[in-house]
Image (cartoon, grey):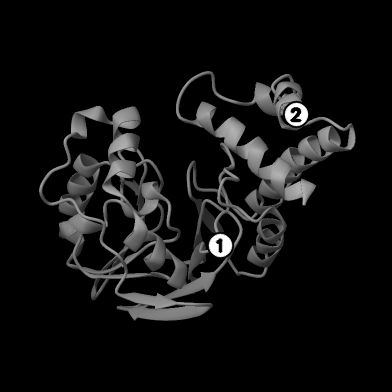
Amino acid sequence: MQKVTDHVYIESESSVCNAGIVATDDGVAVIDTPMVPSSAKKLAHAITRFGAVRYVINTEPHMDHIAGNCYFGGTIVAHDGVRARILAAKEEEMTGMLQRMAPDNLPLDKEFRFRPPEITFSEKLTLHLGQFTLRLIHMPGHTPHSLAVYIPEEKIVFTSDNVNLQMPFFGDASPDLWLKTLERYNNLDVEMVVPGHGSVCDKGCFPKMSLILESWIDAVDKSIKKGLDMEQTLEELAKSEIASRMPEEGPEIDLFRLNVEKLYGFLKR
């Protein structure tokens, strides 16, 4: 675990996304859970030194943020839409992702289940735990149900994948709302930002993320204005600066086509 402040830690080495730990005088709040079962169990055991888990907060409905819920105690909290998505999740989805990313964790153990949140909200919810305030704010963009976890006493915010300087994923996104949400983040009094993936950063990551999104949107929009169809757009963008920033291997490669398809459909409406 990486210590961010005296009371806030993140775990990313064994997690697909950044899992957060807020250690208070009255127990622990966990922000997102590792997807890989062995990693989730390892983290659940490691944080017992801070006390009992009181809350697990899911910042979005994607598998890499929610699949480890069943290995943690406490009450799960998320946006209304996250509960619906988890209730509809299929074990085959989980198995398929583990087959690509962590096949040693198959078959799934008997403990595994998709555990939905017990508490949900639509726009804002405040949790008081020990000496800290956890302000949960609906921040649609990367998904319709994404939320921020803002801890004013620590001047830190967890953004989920609304900030991911490594590789944005548009598959479940509303690009216009995403850009507006990044502007809203600037209103928060924060010094540290924990993105969904990647290193802890400062508020400078918000305009950087906006530029990344705009570069994708502009590239697809230019292809559409040239009269290119979907396949031609994919071919053109494969030669662009966007593609040059893609890793040569790993699951992100599969996201390239999904991103282009999503943006093409969004901009053509």
Residue count near mark 2 (Cα–Cα under 10 Å), binned few <14, some 14–19, many ≥20: many
What x and y, as percent, mark residue 23?
A: 29, 65
Camera-nearest residue between 7 and 261: 261
What x and y, as percent, mark residue 190?
A: 57, 64
Give the structural element (helix, strand or loop) at label 1: loop
Task: Report whether residue 31 is seen.
Answer: no
What x and y, as percent, mark residue 72?
A: 20, 59
Left or right, 163 with respect to 66, comes to right
Camera-nearest residue between 103 and 199: 103
Query: Residue at image x 66%, y 47%?
Result: 209
Task: Report whether residue 117 is seen.
Answer: yes
What amino acid type is highlighted by mark number 2?
Thr
Query: Residue at image x 13%, y 43%?
Result: 109
CA–CA distance in space, label 1 to label 2: 26 Å
What x and y, as percent, mark residue 148?
A: 51, 65
Camera-nearest residue between 21 and 159: 159
Query: Residue at image x 34%, y 36%?
Result: 97
Give the structural element (helix, strand or loop) at label 2: helix
Residue 68 position (above or below residue 118): above
Query: Residue at image x 50%, y 48%?
Result: 200
Name the N-terminal-most of marks 1 and 2.
1
Residue 5 position (above or below residue 84): above
Q: Which mark is residue 144?
A: 1
Q: Which residue is mark 2?
A: 233
What amino acid type is highlighted by mark number 1?
Pro
